[in-house]
Image: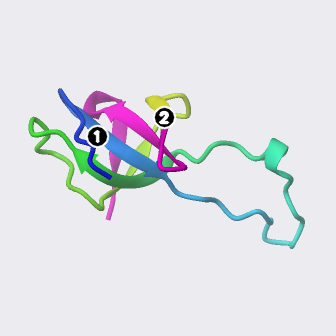
Amino acid sequence: MNFQPLGKRVLVQRTEETGTTASGIIIPDNAKEKPSQGKVVAISSEVDTVNVNDIVVFGKYAGNEFEVDGKKYLIIETDDLFGIIK
């Protein structure tokens, strides 16, 4: 994929959450919440606080979704990122 965000934005792919609870109950897709963390796939040249492959945490409704090659991504401004999981 050839995509580079502009401005102070990053391209994030949400991480998939498990479909069962700790006790083994299966959660249907319509009851799952959108994950609020993901892996940074690309960054703009203006971003210096986040690197590619970092796992970041963001708000539930942060960013704009779009699809490339059948995969869903988010474009998120760096101000909407809460932090990096190390």
Residue visible at 83% across and 42% down in the picture? 30
The answer to which quarter of the image holds residue 8 is: top left
Q: In this view, does 49 lie to the left or right of 2?
A: left
Which image quarter is the C terminus in? bottom left
The answer to which quarter of the image holds residue 20 is: bottom right
Residue visible at 54% across and 28% down in the picture? 61
Please tell me whether the stretch drawn in magenta is mainly helix, strand or loop: strand
User: Residue beneath label 2, please?
Assistant: 66
SS label for mark 2: strand
Q: Front-most of 17 and 3? A: 3
Q: How far apart are marks 1 and 2 (CA)?
A: 13 Å
Check the image and report above or below for 9 versus 24.
above
Residue 19, x across and y down, in percent: 76, 62
Residue 4, x across and y down, in percent: 22, 41
Residue range (magenta): 67-86
- Name which of mark 1 and mark 2 comes first in the sequence: 1
